[in-house]
Image (cartoon, grey):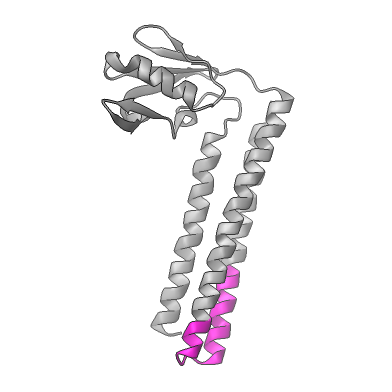
């Protein structure tokens, strides 16, 4: 295979890996009953006029499976942190206790579990679409290389490798979804 073909394949694999990493990050945001600091990933606090990730403004701990404790590094922004959590629509009701914010994570109802599985399925489909879009782009690049003089056999070989890469990543996405679904539905 030519250097351009190898580059095309490497770029496709990198983009497919990014789709997988994105899925893993999204799954971390979908809580499955146990309290976890990662549940607050994506929450941004207005900190002296700058939108800052919550983990950079406070220490976040889970003393037990039903509770998250947030201790601001700067006590003066405790109200900003509380407001940011409420605005994030995570289904939590933060309790400001002066020096800390306590979040009691309610146990999931069966209805809520089914909703979370649907959300996980939706995120899974988005990742699959990302992988397939990468495959389409890589195949277009392979065809372009063929027009630029790459032998037809090499093009076919490259497209086969791209398809194998796609199948491998789609399979991995399905495995991650199955694990997440089991995690969500486990009471």
Q: Nearer the viewer, residue 22 or 45?
A: 45
Residue 61 visible somewhere in the drawing? no
Residue 18 in percent (x, y) is at 47, 55
* Drawn side of residue 55 relative to residue 129, left or right: left
Residue at the spot 69% in from the left edge and 33% down from the top edge: 115
Give the total number of marks visible in the rendering: 0
Q: Residue furthest top?
A: 98
- Above or below — where is 90 with respect to 99? below
The quadrant holding residue 177 is top right
- Above or below — where is 74 with respect to 12? above
Give the position of the C terminus as an image quadrant. Answer: top right
Q: Residue furthest front?
A: 49
Q: Nearer the viewer, residue 47 or 98?
A: 47
* Drawn side of residue 17 relative to residue 173, left or right: left
* Drawn side of residue 91 relative to residue 101, left or right: right
Q: Main secondary structure of the magenta part?
A: helix
* Drawn side of residue 67 relative to residue 181, left or right: left
Residue at the spot 36% in from the left edge and 6% down from the top edge: 98
Residue 40 in percent (x, y) is at 46, 29
Segment tinted magenta in the rendering: 143-164
Q: Nearer the viewer, residue 175 or 99?
A: 99
Residue at the spot 39% in from the left edge and 82% down from the top edge: 3
Does the magenta segment cover residue 160? Answer: yes
The quadrant holding residue 108 is top right
Residue at the spot 34% in from the left edge and 22% down from the top edge: 59
Residue 70 visible somewhere in the drawing? yes
Residue 56 in percent (x, y) is at 31, 30
């Amino acid at each position: 295979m030519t250097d351009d073909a190898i580059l095309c394949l490497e770029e496709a694999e990198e983009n497919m890996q990014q789709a997988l990493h994105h899925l893993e990050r999204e799954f971390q945001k979908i809580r499955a009953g146990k309290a976890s600091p990662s549940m607050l990933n994506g929450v941004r606090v207005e900190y002296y006029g700058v939108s800052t990730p919550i983990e950079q403004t406070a220490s976040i701990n889970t003393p037990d499976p039903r509770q998250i404790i947030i201790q601001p590094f700067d006590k003066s922004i405790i109200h900003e942190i509380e407001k940011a959590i409420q605005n994030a629509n995570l289904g939590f009701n933060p309790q400001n206790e002066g020096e800390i914010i306590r979040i009691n994570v309610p146990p999931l109802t069966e209805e809520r579990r089914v909703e979370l599985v649907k959300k996980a399925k939706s995120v899974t489909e988005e990742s699959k679409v990302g992988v397939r879009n990468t495959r389409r782009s890589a195949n277009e690049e392979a065809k372009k290389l063929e027009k630029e003089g790459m032998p037809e056999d090499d093009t076919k070989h490259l497209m086969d490798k791209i398809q194998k890469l796609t199948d491998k990543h789609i399979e991995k996405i399905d495995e991650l979804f199955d694990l997440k679904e089991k995690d969500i539905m486990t009471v």
